[in-house]
Image (cartoon, grey):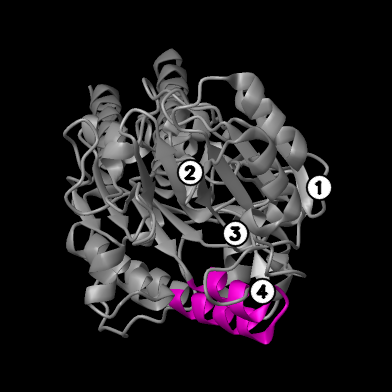
Amino acid sequence: MKAKTFSKSLMIVLLLGTLLISSSVITAKENEKITELNYVVNTINRVVVFSIDAFRYDYISKTDDEPVFQWFMDEGVVADYQVSSNPTVTAVNHVSMITGNHVDEHGIIGNTFYDWEDNKSYSLFSDPLDPYRDTNTGLHLLTSKPSVIHAEENAVKTAVFAWPYVDEGTYYGGISPTYLFDYDWFGDHDMRTDYGITAKTAQVIVSDPEIELVYAWLPGVDAAGHYSGVDSSTVEAVIHSINNALHNFFSQLEKNDLLKDTVVILTSDHGMATVTDSYYFLEDKQFYLDAVGNTSLTPYIAHDAAFELLYFIGETNTSKVEEFASYLKGAPGIQTVYVNEENDAINLNHHDRGVNISVWLDQGMSRHFGSPYVGMHGYLNDNLEMQGIFMVAGPGIKQNSTIGGTSIRDVAPTTLSLLGIESGFVCGGTALSSVEGARTSNFTYPFYVPVTETPTPTETPTPTDEGSFAFFSIISLFVAVVFIINRRRKN
């Protein structure tokens, strides 16, 4: 009787133990699958930055009927606005974006600026009448390290497309991006369009999936704003074309199974404002002529449309420079004037390229260079319409979320932080940790429809599968115990 009772008790204990072990193994495997899924879903292998030139912060309202923009916002994070560097022009802010610094650190003071040490003026544009002009722009002129160079130093492949001041054949500290297709390359290949640049970006990434950091410049909105106006149908048409260009980009990455581990940032260098006077030529104004006549000083002017940089080459008397500035301050059409060290207040006082006097026009005032403008940027960055956008989506990024204002200096450290290589990078910006958040599904592009293929038959699991092996091992143990007990009864 005791033996019988013992056998029943043993059977019950073994049965409960078997079920418990089986349940534990299955639960552990399920947890392992969930952990693995989250790891795959939120793995970032690549960050792509598209700068949509002059895409003003409130142009987001113009994308209500643009499905790619709307999908992107649903899938990611949108900032209320992005503050640009002074001055709010293309060259300056694309360098600010890629270095994480303002002008006083990176050294690109304007589309045209003078270098005291070199005694020459560097510019994106040629001018045969300017005795100081040099159009040899490039990475060698930057005085703070670009994020792509920091990435290359950390064995990360980079690619740059049409980015201002990242030119073919130029280096920073002897280093260049792995892939570099500059502004002239796209012109020579008749691809200097938003669609052409995004298409080339996708092609290069697909050809080399090991590329991890990408910067690409899209110029279309800027040109439309300058010559057609900030609220023109032309601007809306260009935004629609960018929607189509991004559609092609996302489709190509999705087609090649590369989007799920790619973070994409849409940003802009500055905004755009309506021009009310396109004939504001500082050197023709009477107050300027009075300054020249009464001080006997004639500055070299690095001209731009919405601001002017005045250099008094060879003049060491700062009081005379200040006297000159007194004629300009408060003059019609001028918002403000900064003299010598006062330029520190707007991060413009670079050690080799600091300007004597910076003159900032009222928003709406503008000079032109042969063709009048109806839209302009370059004004001080505290003018609301000079603000741009920042949007980000991808693995490891929050979905359908908004954050407050950001700085253009935050782009570079954010890209490096997402790739895990921010350490050692020196800049004034901050990595935007507020955009980070785990996804529960892959970052995929729903508008891309892949070609239907015949599904591969599912194979029957073999005992080498860990879950099956554990289950069958437990069953075998249970059968063995029953067999042993039965034998004991017979004995």
Inspect the magenta stretch and tell me whether residue 50 lies in it: no
Sequence order check, earlier mark of 4 and 1: 4
What distance separates the C-alpha of mark 4 from that of mark 3?
29 Å
Marker disc for residue 97? 2
Q: Tell me which numbered mark, 1 or 3, is placed earlier along the sequence.
A: 3
Q: Residue at x 69, y 48 (%)?
A: 288
Residue type at mark 2? Met
Amino acid type shown at disc 1? Ala
> Dot 1 surroundings within 10 Å: few (below 14), some, or many (20 or more)?
some
- The secondary structure type at the circle numbered 1 is loop
Q: Is residue 240 left or right of residue 201?
A: right
* Residue carrying label 1: 331
| Rendered residue at 58%/62% (across/down) | 54
Q: Nearer the viewer, residue 430 or 21?
A: 430
Q: Give residue 305's mark.
A: 3
Q: What are the residue bounds of the magenta stretch?
A: 220-245
In terms of secondary structure, where does tag 2 sit?
helix
Q: For numbered disc 3, what is the local secondary structure?
A: loop
Residue named by callout 4: 63
Which of the two labelled residues, at mark 4 and mark 2, occupies the earlier sequence position? 4
Q: Is residue 243 in the magenta section?
A: yes
In the rendered structure, are the residues bearing label 1 and label 3 in contact, judged by CB atoms less than 8 Å apart? no
User: Which label sits in the foreground, 1 or 3?
Assistant: 1
Residue 57 x, y percent position in the rendering: 69, 58
Q: Find the distance from the CA under tag 4 to the CA under tag 1.
A: 40 Å
Q: Residue at x 64, y 25 (%)?
A: 320
Q: Position of residue 56 (x, y in %)?
A: 66, 61
Pointers 3 and 2 in contact (C-beta within 8 Å) = no
Q: Quadrant of the N terminus?
A: top left
Crowding at dot 3, Cα within 10 Å, few <14 / some 14-19 / many 20+, comes out as many
Distance (Cα) linking label 2 and label 1: 33 Å
